[in-house]
Amino acid sequence: MSSDHSEPHHDEASSGRSGRSRFIFAFLPLIVFALLAIFFYVQLISGRDANEVPSVLIGTKAPLLDLPPLEGLMHDGSQVPALTDGEIAGKLTLINVFASWCVPCRQEHPYLLELSKDPRIEVVAINYKDKTENALQFLDELGNPYAAVGIDPRGQASIDWGVYGIPETYLVGPDGTILFKQIGPFTEELIAEKLEPLIAEHAVK
């Protein structure tokens, strides 16, 4: 007799568990969406710039630079040097990661041209996953702010630098320490508020 009464209870328990599972799965997308919405709202009200992604490299020695030159890029009749450690040693250096196919790179380029006129810093570049002819055309059209350019056709060197997406720019001190990282294009405000104070502080006297 007892076994006859246990079956309905077992079925009811299974049915209850099944119902709860269906309920959870039905509302799971809504729960995930709500959590994401809360995350982005917190980011928004925090006032932080979405481009300011922390880099574990800041405050550490810059990764090795030994990249081939952008062949055919000339300045005053001479090939623009390759990007190597020797090229930037002892200089306060702005390293810009760019490509001809990158629309934001085109937007920030006028700011790099202006920065290249600042005698306190040297502006150099990593040409990322680009074709030589396209990169040359890009710089011929917009002007060349770079004292040295190294090509990174497979993106291997950029991985070492922790590149998320381009454009990205690094300020490297005369001793080879990474002082600053900018993800996304420069703006007048970013240069004035973030970059200029660091240049003033770390420029070689």
Image (cartoon, grey):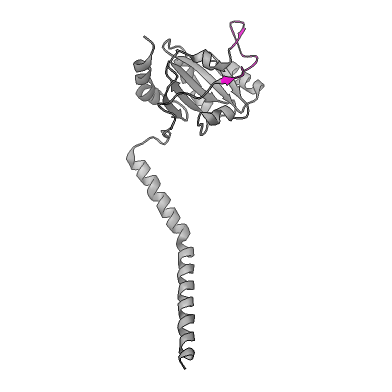
Q: Is residue 153 left or right of residue 180?
A: right
Would residue 145 be seen by someone viewing this image from the given angle? no
Q: Is residue 65 left or right of residue 204?
A: right
In the picture, which quadrant includes the C terminus?
Answer: top left
Identified at 52% across, 33% down, the residue is 165
The answer to whether residue 41 is above or below residue 113 is below
Residue 141 at x, y percent in the picture: 59, 18
Residue 92 at x, y percent in the picture: 43, 15
Q: Residue furthest top?
A: 76
The answer to whether residue 204 is above or below residue 15 is above
Identified at 34% across, 37% down, the residue is 47
Along the line of sight, which residue is nearer the eye, 101 or 159? 159
Would residue 73 be seen by someone viewing this image from the given angle? yes
Identified at 47% across, 28% down, the residue is 185
Residue 90 at x, y percent in the picture: 45, 12
Q: Quadrant of residue 173?
A: top left
Residue 78 at x, y percent in the picture: 61, 7
Indicate whether residue 58 is drawn in magenta: no
Q: Residue furthest bottom?
A: 1
Total numbered circles: 0
**Magenta-highlighted stretch: main secondary structure?**
loop
Along the line of sight, which residue is nearer the eye, 39 or 5? 5
Q: Provide the residue span drawn in magenta.
A: 66-80
